Image (spheres, rainbow, N blue to C red):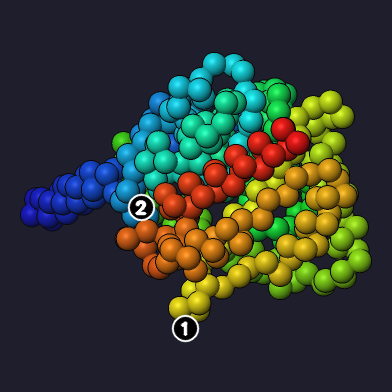
Amino acid sequence: MLKILKKILRLMLSGVISLAVLSVFVYFYKYTSTRVITPNAPTDFTWAPEQAMNTMEEGFAWLEMDDNGYNNIHEKATGTQVDILLMGSSHLLGTEVAATENMGYVLNDLLPFRAYNIGMTGHYLSSCINNLKYAVKTFKPSWYVVIQTDSVSPTTEEMEQVLSGTYEEVESDSSQLFKLIQTYIPASKKIMVQVDAWREADNKKKKKESEIYDPSAYEDLLNRYLASASGCLGDNGPKLIILYTAPTKLDDDGNIIRYDNDTAVFAKACEKNNIIFIDMTDDYCEKFENEDILVHGFTNTAVGSGHLNTDGHLVTAQRLAQVIKEDIYK
């Protein structure tokens, strides 16, 4: 019996040591701290304030979130005044690039206005539109609200949910138990994130396959969906800009693939609802065709896949700054 107990203890100790070693590795390789749930707020959750966000999995960056749990270190991104509010997904959050290279930081350098970035993991177009009224109420942007999205094909289901007020918030791992586990055992977070990614990819595929597409009905719903977004800003409020950061990948012959099948329909709906639509497809394609530079992907990822890289953040911020200048000074 004593021998068995000793063997069990050795196995348990070995497991604890292995998990500890793995957690130290994960902390530097891919650590995202914990999420703080924020219902009826600008984002469904934030990252823990002033906490580390490290990655060597996709790009190389070692960051610290600001007091609100967002990725802002520019001196202009402090205080209460916000001229340009940036909303969007992890592409905008920019934890794959240095703190001084993300879109929000670069935009603050390019414009004489104060931009604040609340880009957040998992917050796609419908998430942002669903939270838009809370974002405007909280930050009171004076000039523009920019919503970044890497897709202009919202599903019928999600648009109907946004319009009916039943759109589900992004799930958060905010329970006290999860926080303790993920803070002190970083390896656990990496495992849970991967499982969630597989599950989400499967759900999206099933929803898309189950939809019956009626062009006329879809366009009507899209118009009402975007009208609800522009309506959140009011007649005398800031202007809404939707920034389409189109995916970029190469085919087998090394030619860039364009993902703009639904762009014309979406652009038309934006124009009808007084929304400025910026399509980055041409900018990204020209960057590759003229300079052999892909705006997605890193040296430690597959070619052209994943999040926006440093060049992607730069060229997007430059185009956004150009559009804003032209609109203000026209």
Q: Secondary structure at mark 1?
A: loop
Q: Residue furthest left?
A: 3
Residue depicted at 66% across the width and 36% down the height: 325
Residue 40 at x, y percent in the picture: 69, 30
Left or right: 211 as drawn, with respect to 99: right
Q: Is residue 91 above or below residue 282?
A: above
Q: Is residue 177 visible?
A: no
Q: Nearer the viewer, mark 1 or mark 2?
A: 1
Q: Is residue 96 visible?
A: yes
Q: Is residue 279 above or below residue 274?
A: below
Q: Residue furthest bottom?
A: 253
Is 134 in front, or is 102?
102
Left or right: 148 as drawn, with respect to 303: right
Classify the position of the C terminus by image quarter: top right
Residue depicted at 29% across the width and 43% down the height: 27
Q: Amino acid at mark 1?
A: Asp
Q: Is residue 196 above or below residue 114?
A: below
Q: Is residue 274 above or below residue 298?
A: above
Residue depicted at 61% across the width and 61% down the height: 281
Q: CA–CA distance between discs 1 and 2?
A: 25 Å
Residue depicted at 86% across the width and 45% down the height: 273
Do residues under tags 1 and 2 come within 8 Å of each other at their CB atoms?
A: no
Residue 174 at x, y percent in the picture: 51, 35
- Give the residue at mark 1: 253
Is 80 in front, or is 178?
80
Is 318 in front, or is 7?
318
Q: Quadrant of residue 38?
A: top right
Count residues near mark 2 (Cα–Cα under 10 Å), then give few for <14, some for 14-19, many for 20+: many
- The total of numbered circles placed on residues is 2
- Give the residue at mark 2: 59
Is 183 in front, or is 238?
238
